[in-house]
Amino acid sequence: MEPPLPTSSTIGYSYTCQPPVNPSFTLILQSNNVRLPKFIIKDLDKVKYATRIFVFPNSKLNELKKKVAATGKAPTNPSRVEVLTSLIFKHAVSAAATKSDSLKPSNLSVATNMRNKFVENYPETAAGNLFTLAIAKMEEFGEIRLSEVISEVRKAKMGLEGMRDEQEVVEKLLNTFSTLQSDIYYSSSVCRVPFYEVDFGWGKPQEVLLRIPNVDENTIILMDTPSGNDITAHVHLPEEEMAILHKDKEFVNYL
């Protein structure tokens, strides 16, 4: 005779059953026919990079949103992620200009979910990653304005609407990269992704950390703090530029 299964009274907690999620693998099958471009790995200088974590309080983010909206040039209702990404991009470019004693045009690349941008939308339960890069070209010399960055990012995302299939996404991305002549800052946001709700049976996590791949690229990744009120930014820049960013009074004011 088999022993009875443990109950909530014997193990100290009970289980809550969630409805099952039925993943869709249609996209994976279709993606086998996508012709990926051949990217040439550029020769990188032996520059040492550093990754730092910055926490931006909600009060400061709201202050920044009001400041951007007050210019009268920003798109309607800019989000916290939009204004923060633009802020870090602006001051990272400024740090690079300070180091080289010259300001160069730069591009902001934003990872963009493509699930709802195709002519025929894919289900949210589609397995795998389906994203591309919306690239805002800031080609003019001079001070970067947050409102202009947000406008350019939104314009780049609008250019991804109504794609026919994955192959068209790949071709558009390759064509965009072929026209870029200046530095690229890669950014992504996982805000609102419920990392802190994940429970494998021993409780929800108190802290979640993201690992930036070991590549020498300018990278910005945003995620929520455990409370969900503030935003944590993982920033990956050359060491010299990171040191300059740390001393940037206007940037530090938002921490």
Image (cartoon, helix red, strand yellow):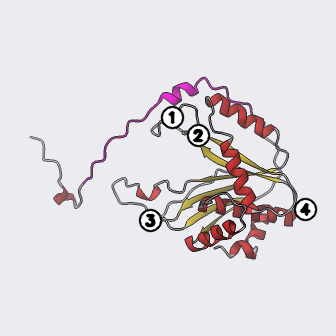
Type of residue at label 1? Tyr
Of circles 2 and 3, the one toward us is: 2
Q: Earlier in the sequence, mark 1 or mark 4?
A: 4
Of circles 3 and 1, the one toward us is: 1
Furthest-left residue in view?
A: 1
**Depicted 220 relative to depicted 229: above or below:** above
Label 2 SS? loop
Q: Which residue is mark 3?
A: 206
In the rendered structure, are the residues bearing label 1 and label 2 in contact, judged by CB atoms less than 8 Å apart? yes
In the rendered structure, are the residues bearing label 2 and label 4 in contact, judged by CB atoms less than 8 Å apart? no
Type of residue at label 2? Met
- Which segment is the magenta one? 15-40
Q: Identify the main secondary structure in magenta.
A: loop
- Residue under the image location 75 percent in, 57 percent down: 148
Mark linked to residue 114: 2
Q: Which residue is mark 4?
A: 102
**Depicted 104 relative to depicted 254: above or below:** above
Q: Earlier in the sequence, mark 2 or mark 3?
A: 2
Q: Which residue is mark 1?
A: 122
Can residue 218 be seen here? The reply is no
Q: CA distance from mark 1 to mark 2?
A: 9 Å
Position of the C terminus by quadrant: bottom right
